Image (cartoon, rainbow, N blue to C red):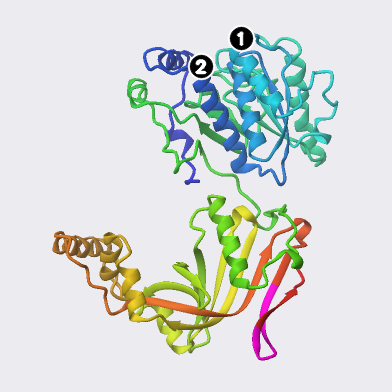
Amino acid sequence: MSSAQNSDSVSHLTQREAAEIDETLMGPLGFSVDQLMELAGLSVATSIAEVYKPSEYDRVLAICGPGSNGGDGLVAARHLYHFGYKPSVCYPKRTQKPLYTGLVTQLESLSIPFLSVEDLPLDFSKDFDIIVDAMFGFSFHGTPRPPFDDLIKRLLCLHGYDQTRQKRPVIVSVDIPSGWHVEEGDIGDEGIKPDMLVSLTAPKLCAKKSSGPHHFLGGRFVPPVIADKYKLRLPPYPGTSMCVRIGKAPNVDISALRENYISPEFLEEQVESDPINQFRKWVDDAIAAGLREPNAMALSTVGKDGKPSSRMVLLKGVDRGGFVWCTNYESRKACELCDNPHASLLFYWDGLNRQVRVEGSVEKVSDEESEQYFHSRPRGSQIGAIVSKRRSVIPGRHVLHQQYKELEEKFSDGSLIPKPEYWGGYRLKPERFEFWQGQTSRLHDRLQYSPQEINGKRVWKINRLCP
């Protein structure tokens, strides 16, 4: 996710402005209620997933009101289910409109339990890790009525657990913390105090008074015509994300950061006898999981001074001969490989809780192989390799742009771009593998492949290492 946006630089809406924007979206701009609800609920779910991982916070209770805010909560519960959470829903005042009954049917088809107010435990902390407050949105007026008034009080009481250091569920409010005035905030100090507020479309004025550690904006659907009309200053959404953090991220004790990995067991009798085949299986899994740059690897080298250095490079080929990548032969890593032709590779696939270490000797690939790969690259990458001549200091980025532009013009006729002599591939010939699969309570699986000779043939011996 991108760096947090300063909350003071983001526009905040009055209740009237929020209502007018909704009317415009669903009027001349052609959005339907169910479209906006789907996008809003997805935004809430992705915001939760950014902070509260299902490995630590999987038990979710969505408390949904009778209006559109409740509908956002129902949609969020569905997406959270597909994200790996275990949601339950409390929906005491059901709306009998087809849109809402359809959302209920979708949740029931996933066997997501619906709990009545009477079914809810007296102590939320024993049964839930996250409570989604989707009771009232910006269009609500007046005082909350039963059973929502009591539910708000029960959620407010959870903050007393902070004084006793007892673990409590975190509260995520959708657009407006229930019990708050849309513009003035928690007037009587009787509203919910969320740990996370997920504003939709644009933050409402009351969001300025939210003191929780996490504030996200969701609802990536505001067209320029509305932004211009209301002079909205909205943060850019990173990549394909449906949410963006507003304000500073909370201070975190780095020593307390930890992940309790949940993975299938990685057992000796299930692995491939050849580590190259096992590596290919894991790469295929990483590609199938949609992980970004599954071929990225940390390359570590050691020069003649004995000092190690590491950097990220991209794997460009793997076969029985080893692992291939390409680089500048005048770079620091190339100089170190010249002094010490041994290196290690590290692949890390976060989404699968996996890493692979490979150690071995390194040699240059043939000129023919380097030439073939160079001309398979996009022409822009070929020109970039020529511009990056060596590990020399340059006065600024403008030098690169100027050289790139000159070469782009030179080869604008589509002629063959010659491979620089100082650019080519390396191949690491593996001598040791380690496959690591993260597990709960740090009891990780580590299987090491090391070569040995049996009857004159080189085979791979598999040993399990301590976590």
Task: Answer with left or right where residue 402 lies relative to residue 308.
Answer: left
Residue 72, by quadrant, is: top right
Task: Answer with left or right where residue 454 lies relative to residue 320.
Answer: right
Identity of the residue drawn at 73% across and 15% down:
148
Identity of the residue drawn at 78% across and 27% down:
157
Q: Nearer the viewer, residue 122 or 449?
A: 449
Residue 190 locus on image (x, y percent): 70, 20
Q: Which residue is mark 2?
A: 33
Is the residue 216 above or below the residue 139 in the image?
Answer: below
Q: Are marks 2 and 1 in contact (CB under 8 Å)?
A: no
Whichever of callouts 2 and 1 sits on the residue coming sooner in the sequence is 2
Can residue 300 be seen by looking at this rendering?
Answer: yes
Q: Which residue is mark 1?
A: 97
Identify which amino acid the numbered label 2 is placed on.
Val
Give neighbour class at mark 2: few <14, some 14-19, many 20+ (Cα, 10 Å): some
Residue 8, by quadrant, is: top left
Residue 453 colored magenta?
Answer: yes
Magenta segment main secondary structure = strand
Residue 24 colored magenta?
Answer: no
- Which quadrant would the C terminus be assigned to in this image? bottom right
The disc label shown at residue 153, or none: none
Q: Which residues are magenta?
A: 448-458
